[in-house]
Amino acid sequence: MSSLPIAAILYTPTDNIEALLVRVARTLAERGVQLGGVIQHDIATAVDDPCAMELEDLHGGERFSLSQELGSGSEACRLDPAALAHASVAVRSAVEDGAQLVMINKFSTQEANGAGLRDEMGLTVMSGIPLLTAVGKRFLPEWQAFTGNDGVLLEPTLEAVLNWWDTLNPAN
């Protein structure tokens, strides 16, 4: 195989990437694809915290908070380290259980800095399981360095992602 089984949806701040990843996950699950990994949901009902987020474990179905409450006026990163550890376990379990595709919400600030779910992305690919993630255009140089400029960059559309998946799995 000339390219790693990696696809990254390249997006800008105006793209609703979380909603797209949810649609991709639902569509592939309906097709019978065994999914693993985590995708993000913004919690619109969190009146006191309009940026509240949770992750969905695509393998186990559990949802858990990704953001932590730091109090009013805080400008610190609200990513909950315990949630990140929980997400790591979810991805690793999916890899061990033979997921057909692992989706990891984003290659973002944490991953660009060598942390976050970066190791889990590498583990997925080294296990021979296709990886789908999303990369903001501002992190494209770090993504290309991480992947050795291998893999595929996709437009932020359901059709582009499904075409990539169908190319990997022509029998489906």
Image (cartoon, grey):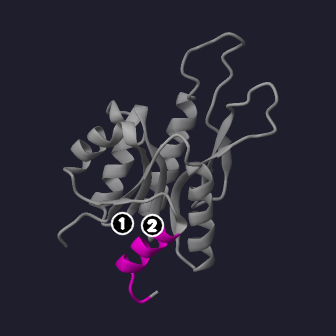
Residue 67 image offset from top left, x and y in percent: 63, 31
Residue 102 image offset from top left, x and y in percent: 45, 61
Name the magenta segment's main secondary structure.
helix
Q: Quadrant of residue 29?
A: bottom right
- Relative to 48, say whether 91 is above or below: below
Q: Is residue 73 left or right of 149 when viewed as pictured?
A: right
Q: Helix, strand, or loop for circle 2?
A: strand
Q: Which residue is mark 2?
A: 101
- Relative to 45, say whether 32 is above or below: below
Amino acid tagged 1 = Ile
Q: Nearer the viewer, residue 164 or 85?
A: 164
Q: Are marks 1 and 2 in contact (CB under 8 Å)?
A: yes
Q: Is residue 101 left or right of 74 when viewed as pictured?
A: left
Question: Which residues are drawn in magenta?
Answer: 159-171
Q: Residue at x 24, y 50 (%)?
A: 147
- Relative to 107, say whether 6 is above or below: below
Q: Quadrant of residue 83?
A: top right
* Numbered badge on residue 129: 1
Amino acid tagged 2 = Leu
Residue 142 image offset from top left, x and y in percent: 28, 38
Magenta-drawn stretch contains 103: no
